[in-house]
Amino acid sequence: MKIFQCKKIKELDQYTIEHEPIRPIDLMERAADALTSAIVRRWTIDTPIVVFAGQGNNGGDALAVARKLIEKQYNVETFLFNTSNHLSEDCTTNRDRLKGVEGVKFTEVTTQFQIPQLTDKHVVVDGLFGTGLDKPLTGGYAGLVKFINSSDATVVSIDIPSGLNGDGRRFDIYPNVIVNADLTLTLQMPKMAFFFAENEDAIGEWEVLDIGLSEDGIRKMETPFSLLEEEDIKTLIEPRKKFAHKGDFGHALLIAGSYGMAGASIMSAKACLKSGVGLLTVHAPSLNVPILQAVVPEAMIQPDLNEHCFTMPSPTQDYDALAIGPGLSQREETITALLLQLEDIQIPLVLDADALNILSENQDYLKKLPPYSVLTPHPKELERLVGKCADSYERLQKAIELAAALRVYIILKGAYSIIISPDGLCAFNSTGNPGMATGGSGDVLTGIVLALLAQGYAAKEAATIATYVHGLAGDKAATANGMIAMTAMDVVNELPNVWKQFER
């Protein structure tokens, strides 16, 4: 699914109006029908509803929804805030239509107004400001938003909570005043801001409503942003040939673990083996060898000369892909070994965890990474590489710049992990859940990426498939074990069920 920035969504609206063709007011009516249906599905006719509408088209949507709810016999009180005495054309039309409804409770606010009493039985429909907002809310509007947020009412925002920038940019005034919605009913497609952690409380649950924007326009319009879906992954996974043998699926090398951190190498190795690799060798400190051989018997073990950590760079000419980082530690001798390991790598490379942390302190070595390597940082690890970020939007922009500068793929891990390509394309992952916020989850992802690279998948495909599959295995683990109790090994154990789902 394509994700458009707000200016592109406005262009898509206009494309639909011109090419369907449809009048703007009729497209607004279509949106209001979808919004009204979503509200009616969730709340019964005895629910008191208060609608707050602004002066633009978001307000026009809200006024149309109010009218349609009244027609369905809902008890609706509507406030239109027209403090500048200038409404958009379609907002004006819907104001006049609403005022023509018999028995309507309608107030057009131009200065002060009597604040309605809101209880926990009320639903507030927020239609004050939409995706066109380009400055923070101040004055009376800020006061109104604070009043809404302090009430016990359930809040439903139309398209996007008022006060939030749709692209996720932070306004100069911080903290911004934003409606905290319990439900956001967004039109046609999710907005960029929905995928950023700091906006979770404002957006609440979100539901996408199809309002029939032009499919031709969506297809033609370019955007670097997308949301991964199952069909995207199905097209990427290669079927296995009947006469295939283990040599066809690559030999992977995993450099991972330190004394006391054998678990990281175990989880990464198991994930790699359960993701189709032909052969796996794990390079580990000698004290970790017995446990690896006992717990991961399918892997070959290459002992380091040191008992406690990685100190001995490994030749890579006999391998098809290399992953470095899980549980590695940042001891002085490990730092030296890692930097030497990176001097002349000619095979696909995955870097995670301590490997990234070491590189953040030795940034000249970033330039030595093979083109199209895969980096798998969580937000803090990324910031160690690119500097402190004010918010998720800035973090994404810096990650895009880093991927382009180094010609690498970055999997920026999070609730919606983002696969960032050197050409600036960004795919948000749709699988995964909060239960995966547990130690070892990233090690599992590294193992999956390593397995796919060893099998010959290009870096972009490997990163994309691995991220989606990792999240889907996490979703299955949450279903089986619950999010609170699940562990990273539960994710590993669900990988066979996920891969089976994609076999064809």
Image (tube, grey):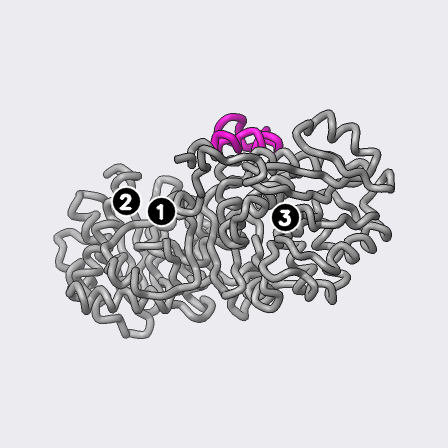
Q: Specify the segment rendered in magenta.
A: 475-498
Write the residue at 73% across / 63% down. 365
Nearest the eye: 149 or 439: 439
> Is residue 421 in sight in this rendering?
yes
Q: Secondary structure at mark 2?
A: helix
Write the residue at 32% across / 64% down. 54
Inspect the magenta stretch and tell me whether residue 407 lies in it.
Answer: no
Quote the CA–CA distance across marks 2 and 3.
Answer: 49 Å
Q: Are marks 2 and 3 in contact (CB under 8 Å)?
A: no
Quote the CA–CA distance across marks 3 and 1.
Answer: 40 Å
Q: Secondary structure at mark 3?
A: strand
Whether residue 382 is situated above or below residue 255 in the rendered picture: below
Q: Which residue is mark 2?
A: 38
Select label 1 or label 2 by which is in front: 1
Q: Residues within 10 Å of mark 3 (few under 14, many from 20)?
A: many
Nearest the eye: 8 or 422: 422
Q: Are marks 1 and 2 in contact (CB under 8 Å)?
A: yes
| Quadrant the C terminus occupies | top left
Q: Position of residue 393 (x, y in %)?
A: 53, 62
Q: Which residue is mark 3?
A: 321
Q: Which mark is residue 207?
A: 1
Whether residue 31 is situated above or below residue 183 in the rendered picture: below
- Label 2 is placed on what type of residue? Ala
- Label 3 is placed on what type of residue? Ala
Q: Earlier in the sequence, mark 2 or mark 3?
A: 2
